[in-house]
Amino acid sequence: MQAQAQADGLCLRFPESIGMHRELTIDAAAVLLLRGTSHAMGVPFSWGYVDKPQEGQTLLLFIPGQSPFPNDGIRYQEPETKYTVSVTIQGTPREIEVHEVKFGFVPGMDAGAFRQRKRYRMTKGGHPQMILVHYSRGPVAQIVPALMNQPVRTYPLRVFNEPAVYVVGDKAGQKVYPPGAGPQTGGMGGMPMGMGFNPQQAMVARQNSDMALLERRREQEQRARAGSNARPARVEEEDSGDENDTISTRALSLTRYRRNHDIMAEVFTHAAYNLKNAPPPPSPYSIFNKAELEAQTVRILNESIVSRYMTSRFRKN
């Protein structure tokens, strides 16, 4: 079933619409590839087919390794040509590999071979497994009579209820099940083999997911600490059984190291730089009023003079 799925053209497609483009330049294709790769880090790709696409239709596919381009329901009367073009996007030089094929038709539906397909792959400066495909109308050629009604693929196409999957980024290999569904052991057992993923990638993806979960928890703790004057309760360092079952030792150790590093950095930063920008201390005499002190001094001196005068006059008498 897995081999049949690949033969039928089952592939991973970007689920969002890229729009209809009557024409597509090399520069525009490069921009779409870069944007698509960036969006793919947060959007899982869906399993599906490319079948008899319309003129102007543009698709973003993930085709790993040396896997052939999937069957798209079109028969082409000429071999596909390949060439490389150098482009500069945002000041960065890049190379795009272009595969072009003309004179395509859908058997039993088209009266002439006018369909044209170009697919773009960024071999330098991008992700080489992300493929941008553009279908357009080209010059019309007569269909070879022997191929007029010869089918390209078997219909109806098989239905595969496989969950969407992330293909690039830290979540690569993670499946996204619809609400209420979960991993199942029947059918194809998840992702078809030979489609570019292996158990090691799945393990790395799982570890990245656990790491991201711990990072989010750490950020929530920091935000809670910053928004409250009360010091949060100290998190216990002992391992729990559930934690060991779901989080790898390396990911847990790295997260604890980062958390402890942040705590120590906060302590030392406060100790080293807390008084650096503090205002100068007030003068020790600032609590006294100079005018009052001078008035008191004059009063005391006058009283001292009067006292001496009275004492001297008393002695004479």
Image: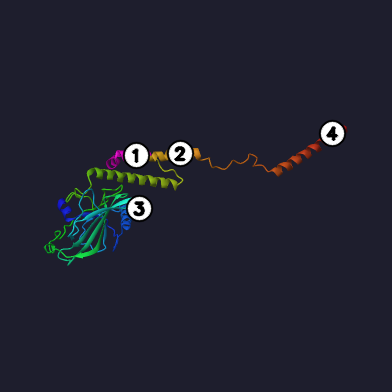
- Judging by the rendered image, the residue that carries numbered circle 4 is 312
Q: Which of marks 2 and 1 is nearer the N terminus?
A: 1
Task: Please state which of residues 26 and 250 is positioned toward the viewer in this rendering.
Answer: 26
Work out how far the residue at label 2 is from the one at label 4, CA to CA, in angstroms.
Answer: 70 Å
Question: Is 63 drawn above or below residue 248 in the view shown?
Answer: below
As drawn, the residue found furthest toward the left would be 146
Magenta residues, dominant SS class? helix
Q: Which mark is residue 267?
A: 2
Of discs 1 and 4, which sits in the foreground? 1
Mark nearer the viewer, 1 or 3: 3
- The residue at the point 71 percent across, 44 percent down is 291
- Residue 91 left/right relative to 4: right
Q: Label 1 belongs to which residue?
A: 254
In the rendered structure, which disc, 2 or 4, sits on the residue that comes first in sequence? Answer: 2
Dot 3 or dot 4, earlier in sequence: 3
Q: Name the residue under label 3.
A: 88
Name which residue lies at 25% across and 62% down.
Answer: 136
Q: How crowded is mark 2: few (under 14 residues within 10 Å), some or many (20 or more)?
A: few
- Label 3 crowding class (10 Å Cα cut-off): few <14, some 14-19, many 20+? few
Alpha-carbon neighbours of circle 1 within 10 Å: few (<14), some, or many (≥20)? few
- Rendering quarter of residue 76: bottom left
Q: How far apart are marks 2 and 1 (CA)?
A: 20 Å
Residue type at mark 3? Thr
Which is more foreground, mark 3 or mark 2?
Answer: 3
Residue 300: where, in percent of width, then height? 76, 39
